[in-house]
Image (cartoon, rainbow, N blue to C red):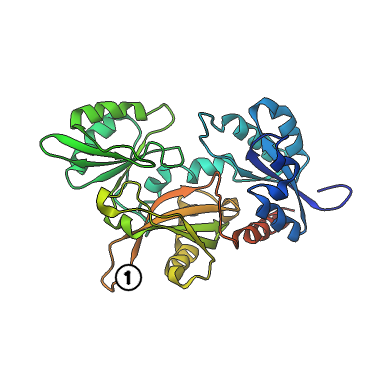
Amino acid sequence: MDAHSGEIAVAIVWRGDENAPDARQPESGRLNAIFSALIRGGMRPVPAPYDERHADAFARRLRETDAVLVWVNPIDAGRNRKALDDILREVASAGSFVSAHPEVIAKMGVKAVLHRTRTLGWGSDTRYYEAPAAFAAEFPALLAQGPRVLKPNRGNGGIGVLKVETAEGSMVRVQEAGGEAAIRVLPLREFMAEMHGAFSADDGLLDQPYQARLTDGMIRCYVSGRRVAGFGHQMVRALAPPEAGPGGRRLYFGPADPRFQDLKTVLEREWIAQMADQLALSLDELPVIWDADFLLGPKNEAGKDSYVLCEINASSVFPIPDEAPDAIAATLRERLARER
């Protein structure tokens, strides 16, 4: 807490240059709504752009604050978060509140969470292969039952996400997400050998059934702690059939939008707490802002939609609905009040 003003000092972290205009005048940057919401909530936001070249000065700045809120992607132009996460762990150990904490991201912000929570109401027939041998043993038989989607454990922006389906003979058709990449057709054995490069000592490969209703759109639920703070809806076309036509930009809606109340209710009453329990997280460890992406699954006997979780984002959730910044400020104040 600021010794002079008595205000709670909150560092706002993004990847950037401390001499850039948005660092000197954060009200003009992309996170300006976060700064404004914290001020309305009686807190003092502190700009803290992160650059590996100035890590020592950055770490000193964080140590002078009560809380740290982070918007940094896991992968960005070939750079990762390892050095940043080490700083965040040290700052958290010294007593600052950090959201999202690297250990929390490691549990819920990776694709393996889809496998760990597959038994919840949002789950599907999801596999997680820790090594190429397991992938070789299980994937061909699953692929014979229908199209599958493969995802690297860590990443963002659709990097490395593939739709795979059988083609004539022993061939497979492979479509990449995120862009205009052409669909490739190649022998299954060649594809399996190619995928060896997707594995590392720390990370495996996530495998889910392709959802046929992808063309009906994706619902992104923005969550602050345990409460839904808004929604996004987008007609996605990554992995969609070529004949699906053009997609569209994501549109944002508040938490009271009537179209999404069934999903909001089951999230807040059941799935969020069940996920936290599965991941051995307390509800107070959940990030002050995170999101869960859902595709529509088959309708049930009553004709209602089911929902299939396809990703959780916890590292850098932005843009967000207009209502979300004030929800972030409220969640942060509640967390800090309980910790003190």
Task: Please determine whether, in this image, residue 261 is positioned above or below residue 203.
Answer: below
Identify residue type, mark 1: Lys
Quadrant housing residue 193:
top left
Asked whether residue 109 is in view, the answer is: yes
Q: Callout 1: 10 Å neighbours few (<14), some, many (20+)?
A: few
Q: Camera-side residue: 54 or 337?
A: 54
Left or right of residue 330, residue 111 in this image: left
Callout 1: SS: loop
Quadrant housing residue 63:
top right
Left or right of residue 259, residue 240 in this image: left
- In the rendered image, the residue lying farthest to the right is 4
User: Pointer 1: what residue?
Assistant: 304
Task: Please determine whether, in this image, residue 255 is positioned above or below residue 168.
Answer: below
Left or right of residue 289, residue 240 in this image: left
Q: Which residue is depicted at the point 62% across and 44% down?
A: 70
Q: Which residue is depicted at the point 59% across and 61% down?
A: 322
Q: Which residue is depicted at the point 60% across and 34% down?
A: 85
Q: Position of residue 75 (x, y in %)?
A: 51, 34
Q: Camera-side residue: 95 or 83?
A: 83
Q: How many marks?
A: 1
Q: Position of residue 314 (x, y in %)?
A: 53, 47
Left or right of residue 241, residue 339 in this image: right
- In the rendered image, the residue lying farthest to the front is 246
Q: Which residue is depicted at the point 45% across and 54% down?
A: 249
Task: Please determine whether, in this image, residue 312 is positioned above or below residue 83.
Answer: below
Q: Position of residue 315 (x, y in %)?
A: 55, 43
Q: Position of residue 87 (x, y in %)?
A: 66, 33
Q: Camera-side residue: 277 or 117?
A: 117
Asked whether residue 95 is in view, the answer is: no
